[in-house]
Image (cartoon, rainbow, N blue to C red):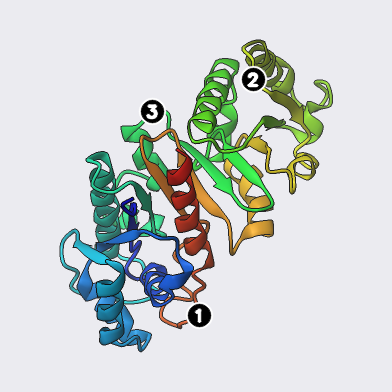
Amino acid sequence: MSLPKIGLTLGDPCGIGPEIVIRLIQNFSQLPPCHLVIFGQKKIIESWAEILAFPQETWDGISREFGVTVQESGKEMKEIKPGYPSAESGQASFSFFKEAIEAAQKGEIQAVVTGPISKASWQMAGIKFRGHTEFLESLFSEALMSFWSERLRLVLFTHHLPLTEAVARVKKKALLEFFLVLERNLKRWNMGVEELLVCGLNPHAGEEGTIGLEETTEIIPAIVQAQSLGLQIEGPFPPDTIFLKALDQPQRMVVCLYHDQALIPFKLLSFDSGVNLTLGLPFIRTSPDHGTAFDLAGKGVASPRSFREAIWLAWRLLQTG
């Protein structure tokens, strides 16, 4: 049986992504059995290897032994300045990501694990997408942002939106469509989720209409209709207690209505080990649950744990999907 090919993107060349990729390769025995294809540039890797005092002969030996390859992507960078966003690094990280997605669409790789990008760098480069998921949504209408760790599983109804826009999207029809797409994808990849718990939007889930009406006018009708279609779904539950119902319950997933409703509890519990998984794609895409950490870039202290967990999750899904 041939080993799966998993693509890794370096992320922003001036953030901690390249450092983490090098640390992963340095400890290849801790990764699942696979061939890794790194979408980036050898020059960037060499620059970071020098910063980290990672010998070139060590890299070459690992590459030969385990079949790690570098897929040259994007325009060659003129300057790599760790710790600082730039238009050049934004364009480079977008090119790495875009070419990895194109390779997955062609079947050249079976999964994509993306390094962290800087939204500021993308904006400086004139890229219209706020992040990875927004780009994927432009290609795949059913793309959903979810987060996975040993202790908690979440999915976002909306993600990188101003709060006023996120609240305005909480409508019965959109919620029901979201529930159905989510259920279909959880079954497709055999994710082990048996029950969906839906967050309320307002404090105390609206307190029967006394602290907001969205629960009674939009959320509850969508849940009731989803139940009539056979979904195991309950709610809305007060946002300040719902996560306790799902904590250490891998068969339960919390449906969160906006970004921080999900990411505050998730990062509190699983900052170093959580994984971002995009559902609704014809291939697997995961990423570490952290950003570029410009304040740590170049200091040799970045942890590869979340990136490693992202690779393991992609590999496990390839075994069951």
Q: Which residue is mark 1?
A: 301
Give the class, few, some or many, for how many residues have Cα within 10 Å of label 3's Cα (few <14, many ≥20): few
Quick one: label 3 or label 2, which is nearer the N terminus?
A: 3
Which residue is painted at 22% across and 67% down in the image?
Answer: 41
Residue 231: mark in rendering: 2
Q: Residues within 10 Å of mark 2 (few under 14, many from 20)?
A: some
Identify residue type, mark 2: Leu
Q: Distance of mark 1 from mark 3, alpha carbons?
A: 38 Å
Residue 116 x, y percent position in the rendering: 42, 60
**Residue 21: quadrant of the picture:** bottom left
**Which quadrant would the C terminus be assigned to in this image?**
top left
Q: Earlier in the sequence, mark 2 or mark 1?
A: 2
Q: Looking at this view, is 172 or 186 the one in front?
A: 186
- Residue at the spot of label 3: 141
Of marks 2 and 1, the one in the foreground: 2
- Where residue 243 sits, quadrant-wise, is top right
On screen, residue 88 above or below 189 = below
Using the image, determine if residue 209 lies above or below residue 246. Answer: above
Please state the horizontal and vertical placement of residue 312, each as a whole percent of the image.
Answer: 48, 56
Numbered tag placed on residue 143 in the rendering: none
Q: Amino acid at mark 1?
A: Val
Q: Is residue 155 visible?
A: yes
Q: Residue furthest front?
A: 1
Across and down, in percent, residue 67 comes to 27, 66
Q: Nearer the viewer, residue 28 or 178?
A: 28
Residue occupying the point 32% across, 82% down: 49
Label 1 vs 3, first from the N-terminus: 3
With 195 as the anchor, is 139 left or right in this view?
Answer: left
In this rendering, position of residue 280 left or right of residue 54:
right
Q: Secondary structure at mark 3?
A: loop
